[in-house]
Amino acid sequence: AQRVTQPEKLLSVFKGAPVELKCNYSYSGSPELFWYVQYSRQRLQLLLRHISRESIKGFTADLNKGETSFHLKKPFAQEEDSAMYYCALSVHFGNEKLTFGTGTRLTIIP
Amino acid sequence: GAVVSQHPSRVICKSGTSVKIECRSLDFQATTMFWYRQFPKKSLMLMATSNEGSKATYEQGVEKDKFLINHASLTLSTLTVTSAHPEDSSFYICSAPVEFPRRLSGSETQYFGPGTRLLVL
């Protein structure tokens, strides 16, 4: 069975400093990887997905199949980045059934 | 963008009663919806896939007789927690993949509801 691991439950970063939220996965095939974000009192929303190769709100994530990782990065943290971040995996393209990691709460220190 | 609503947003009930939670896609059709459960400070766990016009598909370890799912139309799925017990207290979230019209915005292909907090006393 597939699994998503986010080793950091909490991460605090100073405003303007680089951010990296770690995500590792285990799956024998070729999964689709996502990052979801949940701001305070808001619903879960997609931040980015690896096949899009987009940069959303300054965040990027590269799928590293060799290391089975999909770390989320941003060069300069902003206060509005404070939120809960979930890494997720889908094993079938086009099927949005997701396996989520346990999430990382990111706090940006002013 | 597309919106998924859930009703109620929170519910408190007595042990032994049944609770129904609705999930609606407001401006798109969803032949499939997903139901997740989130424990405090834990991840979202997929419970089941709701299929319009057919039986739901449950994940391993989820009691289908406990969590009844009905996908009554292309925009509505309901989750009924039967004979609720305190251990069923949790945050229940639904999601709906965008099928028609497709890809309303950017790379977003699935929209999540705001969640329903269930507390069983």
Image (tube, rainbow, N blue to C red):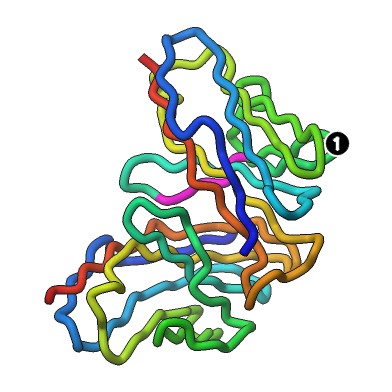
Q: Residue at x 25, y 80 (%)?
A: A78
Q: Position of residue B113 (x, y in %)?
A: 55, 48
Q: Is residue A49 magenta?
A: no
Foreground pick, B103 / A27: B103
Residue stretch in magenta:
B43-47
For the point 59% across and 40% down, the residue is B47
Quadrant of the snapshot with the N terminus of chain B: bottom right
**The quarter of the displayed image where residue B76 is located:** top right
Farthest residue toward the right? B53
- Residue at image position (81%, 60%) is B100
Q: Secondary structure at mark 1?
A: loop
What kind of residue is marked 1?
Ser
* Nearer to me, A66 or B54: B54
Measuring from the top left, give residue B84's x and y in whole percent.
Answer: 50, 16
The quarter of the picture where the C terminus of chain B appears is top left
Q: Looking at the image, which residue is at 77% across and 35% down?
A: B71
- Residue closer to the observer: B100 or A60: B100
Characterize the magenta stretch by its predominant secondary structure: strand
State whether residue B86 is above or below residue A60.
Answer: above
Residue B54 position, x and y percent, is: 86, 36
Q: Is residue B121 above or below residue B39?
A: above
Whole-percent x and y of residue B82? 59, 16
Q: Nearer the viewer, residue B2 or B16?
A: B2
Per the image, the residue denoted by label 1 is: B54
Relative to B79, say whether A49 is above or below.
below
Q: Residues within 10 Å of mark 1 (few under 14, many from 20)?
A: few
